[in-house]
Image: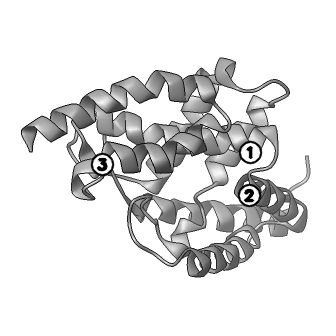
Amino acid sequence: MTQDTPRLDAQMAFLTEACRLKSVQRATRLADGSRFENSAEHSWHVALYALILADQAPQGCDINRVIRMLLIHDLVEIDAGDAPVFGSYDADALAQAEAAAADRIFGLLPADMADDLRALWDEFEANQTADARFAKSLDRFVPPNLNIANGGGSWKDYGVSVEKFEASIAPKIANGAPGLWAWLKPRARAVFARLAQDG
């Protein structure tokens, strides 16, 4: 194999830039509650969820594409930052910032790779295909499980009620992974019940 220095330079520039995702703090704590996770950790963890929970994917779903989507889905947070699900932010402004970030970050790659990964990111954002729906569902499934493990985490931080949680999160998980929502719902309700008792 001959060395293609410009191509390798571009690939390495992208990979070096991707390292910055490790510095983007999220609103969710680790399962042990010891600290907040970063977006790179989240991307790895949700990709692992896809691998392990592949049997929950809808028919026709390509789990390898889902894993690829999840590995890149939050790279735009390098520029746009993380927007907590229960935080307040301008959704339109965030979408514009994320699209600009996608242009810049994927644009670091050689053109063929840039086009491929940007199309995959756009597919994830559009949430129309079976692959994207399952990926999006998993993206929403991970944080509640961390909150359950650490005793409420960001639900306590943002004053989230069980009603608000279910109205916001249930449709997003059930859309691509109804079995996972059925499993999660009673476990989340049990934590919210404990939080209400603790007042």
Q: In which quarter of the image is residue 136?
A: top right
87, 103: nearer the viewer = 87
The residue where tag 2 is placed is 121
Q: Quadrant of residue 91?
A: bottom right
* SS of the residue under disc 2: helix
33, 196: nearer the viewer = 196
Residue 132 image label: 1
Relative vertical location of residue 168 with respect to residue 67 in this rendering, above or below: below
In the image: residue 187, left or right of residue 14:
left
For badge 2, the amino acid type reads: Trp
Q: How far apart are marks 1 and 3 (CA)?
A: 28 Å
Q: How far apart are marks 2 and 1 (CA)?
A: 9 Å
For disc 1, the neighbor class at 10 Å (few under 14, some 14 to 19, many from 20) is many
Kindly tell me whether residue 125 is visible in this rendering.
yes
Q: Where is residue 124 in the image (x, y as percent from the top left)?
A: 72, 52
Kindly tell me whether residue 150 is visible in this rendering.
no
